[in-house]
Image: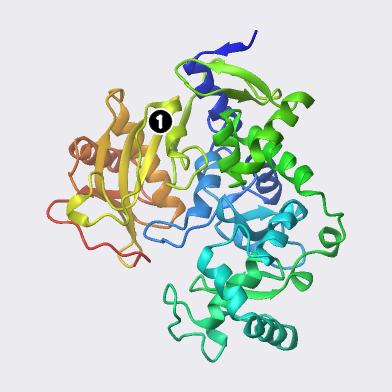
Amino acid sequence: MKEKISAAAARRIALAAQGLGESRGVLPVVERRHLKRFLWRNGLLQIDSVNVLVRAHYMPLFSRLGPYQLNLIDDNAKGKKRLLFEYWAHEASLLPVETQPLMRWRMERARRGEGIYGRLAEFGVERADYIDSVLREIEARGALAASDFEDGRGQGKWWGWSDAKHALEWLFWAGLITTDERRASFERVYDLTERVLPKTILSLPTPSPDEAQRELLRISARALGVATAGDLRDYFRLPAGDMKARIAELVEAGDIVPVRVEGWTQQAYLDPAAKKPRRIEARALLSPFDPLVWERSRAERLFGFYYRIEIYTPAERRVHGYYVLPFLLGEAIVARVDLKADRQAGVLRVMAAHREPHAPGHTAEALAEELALMAGWLGLERIEVVPAGDLGKDLGQAVRRSAVETAPGTTARSARAGTGSAPGDLADGT
């Protein structure tokens, strides 16, 4: 008979698997070894270009470990001793270099036009000679960005990309080139994969597609703790057609265990090594692209939390704001807050704050503390709260109280609750 897991236990298993609820903010310095531990547990960091607060791939480490130097990730995503490389996993992602052999089947399929954006696949067929010329250019000249090509800033036929950008993206999907580094503008600089990745990684044997997919699912199971087949597949965006057989193989091998979760209509699977804590005491702001919430139906199943990012929704139709972060407190998501880093003014701006129906009475105070921690991490001097949303007024008061109580000399020591209209949205921050 299948083990039955309560909804509360499933939440705790998921939080523990993600490293949320452990000692946070107590490390004197977050170092390379802590990043390695995070990568072993979580498997990847999703990349997103929006920088209205801080780029998405920086947030999960902060949510789990507290403040750290942002260059920790940057420094480990370049050079011969890199821990990370870029590829398509859960969308564009930073992955441990050891994962590269597990992605070679996807690269091979991309070369055949499979599993790649349809229009980019068409470009690969129609402009094969041009793609080859771009590859030869990189071979001869070394690492290059799209803007380094003569047509790099021109407008192409699709997405507004230049032909050079199309060619580079096709080569990137195919695994023939990869990101050497990112420029200050966040533009990718590409080089040949064999010149970027360590030789120890390149020399690893290539597993069969079945073997690679099974291992990726094992990583997903470890990162999720308890999950449906859809959750497991989504983590690395694996092909739906391959998954029924792979899941059955992992069950047969004992690598995942079928269980029933209270309130879930779908079959669930448990990582047999998952921790089953009796209590979780977490406090964290979560990026919209955090693994805990990026699969929106899973967030709803686990937390009763209906969440949609509204960046692309017209301003007048937004419900909660432009760049909204869920706030995790204890074992529940208790609020959501629309944030903006005004770097020129040195201000962390709270554009709106909304509480969830089950939010405890101390939500505003706990969120004010978390915002102060974030402001200090980002080097912002104060917090300003627009009293919008049903939590905005209480949060503004909590921020003011916290500012009065904070000892002189600490970062983010001054704050005020703002009023009036919010500044305009800036996709790249200020």
Query: In this orientation, which residue lies closer to the viewer: 390 or 415?
Result: 390
Q: Position of residue 55 (x, y in %)?
A: 47, 58
At 39% from the left edge and 40% from the top edge, which residue is drawn?
370
**Number of marks drawn:** 1
* Quadrant housing residue 88: bottom right
Q: Furthest residue to the top?
A: 1
At 55% from the left edge and 46% from the top edge, which residue is drawn?
61
Q: Position of residue 359 (x, y in %)?
A: 30, 25
Image quarter (top left, top right, bottom left or bottom right) of the C terminus: bottom left
In this figure, which residue is indicated by the disc labeled 1? 300
Residue 70 lies left or right of residue 133; in this view the side is: left
Residue 105 lies left or right of residue 17; in this view the side is: right
Q: Position of residue 157 (x, y in %)?
A: 44, 79
At 60% from the left edge and 40% from the top edge, which residue is drawn?
233
Q: Position of residue 339 (x, y in %)?
A: 32, 51
Query: In this orientation, which residue lies closer to the viewer: 364 or 104?
Result: 104
In the rendered image, the vertical position of residue 179 relative to residue 45, given as above or below: below
The answer to whether residue 180 is seen in the rendering is no
The answer to whether residue 103 is seen in the rendering is yes
Q: Amino acid at mark 1?
A: Glu
Image quarter (top left, top right, bottom left or bottom right) of the N terminus: top right
SS class, disc 1: helix
Residue 45 lies left or right of residue 97; in this view the side is: left
Query: In this orientation, which residue lies closer to the viewer: 304 or 239?
Result: 239
* Quadrant housing residue 213: top right
At 43% from the left edge and 72% from the top edge, which residue is drawn?
159
